[in-house]
Amino acid sequence: MNAPSTIHKASVQFSPGEARIRVQNLGKRYGTLEVFRDVTFDVGAREIVAVVGPSGCGKTTLLRCIDGLISVDNGEIWVDHTRVTGPTPGMAMVFQHFGLFPWKTVADNVAYGLRMAGTPKAEIAKRVPDFIKLVGLAGFEKAYPYQMSGGMQQRCGLARALAVEPNVLLMDEPFAAVDAQTREILQFELLRIWQQRPTAMIFVTHSIEEAVLLGHRVVVLKGRPSSIYETIAIDLPGQRTRETLREPRFAELRERVWSTLMSEARAAEFVLENQN
């Protein structure tokens, strides 16, 4: 059984223009393997920062460090003026593989984090239906995970994270396990939900198109150990819809991120060719 999404109760409120997350000179290693070093960036209180990079560069490890699930070897992480040394109030994390309890209904899964936080029963009863409706699952409150599609399960996982009203939402490739059509639907659903309830979000993905569509900035990790090679501002005009995917500026930004990542892949291929 997959572990449930990590959920913590929200706390301090920040002003819209202030950084909610600060990652400073972060480094992580496992024994002699150095995963990443000198990673520094911040995330505004109402900003989505997408993180991309080649497989094995430490994207998920970075996200788990920010959530306080694993320790760091160098640097610091600050959330809402509090240094992260473990699971921190105000953060919710959504993993790739849904993480729903198979024996619980949609309503009970969504309520799980609230119950763990000691929220009064009356407040849970009031809040849970609102978040089920927000993610488009109204009418499925009594359904079990095995009765739902992958997309519906991930909506349920998202509702569970949102129900605690976090200040920080961490997304670890949340749409990677669903088909392409469902993935696109969920991308725009997430944008719709974020417009209604904006918060600081870090979105880890392997998809360059997804990073450009969702992110206000894209952080590109490269190298071994990895570090931030470039941070790209996504200056797409207006509210993002399916029309955005056909905008010339979208294509330009996607190509810029793609070229940045592919330069390393080409270099590695050249080295291998010389060794043969």
Image: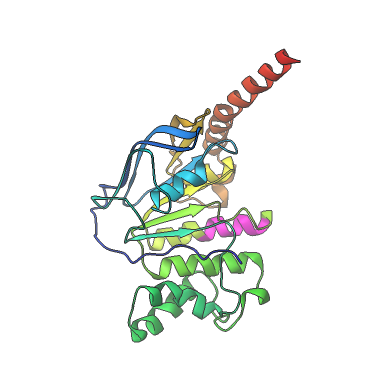
Q: Position of residue 252 (x, y in %)?
A: 54, 32
Placement of 164 over or under 142, stated as above or below: above
Q: Which residues are magenta?
A: 181-189
Magenta-span inclusion, residue 182: yes
For the N terminus, the quadrant is bottom right
Q: How is the image coloured?
A: rainbow
Residue 80 as seen in the image, left or right of residue 96:
left
Residue, x 60% and y 69% (percent of image)? 152
Count of numbered circles in the view: 0
For the residue pair 246 and 67, the one nearer the viewer reads as 67
Residue sitting farthest toward the bottom? 122
Q: Position of residue 11 (x, y in %)?
A: 27, 63
Residue, x 49% and y 31% (percent of image)? 226
For the residue pair 241 and 127, the one nearer the viewer reads as 127
Residue 178 as seen in the image, left or right of residue 48:
right
User: Which quadrant holds residue 266?
Assistant: top right
For the residue pair 261 and 5, the one nearer the viewer reads as 5
For the C terminus, the quadrant is top right
Q: Position of residue 162 (x, y in %)?
A: 42, 66
Placement of 35 over or under 66, stated as above or below: above
Q: Position of residue 24 (x, y in %)?
A: 32, 37
Placement of 231 over or under 68, stated as above or below: above
Residue sitting farthest toward the front? 31
Q: Main secondary structure of the magenta part?
A: helix
For the residue pair 233 and 225, the one nearer the viewer reads as 225
Residue sitting farthest toward the top? 274
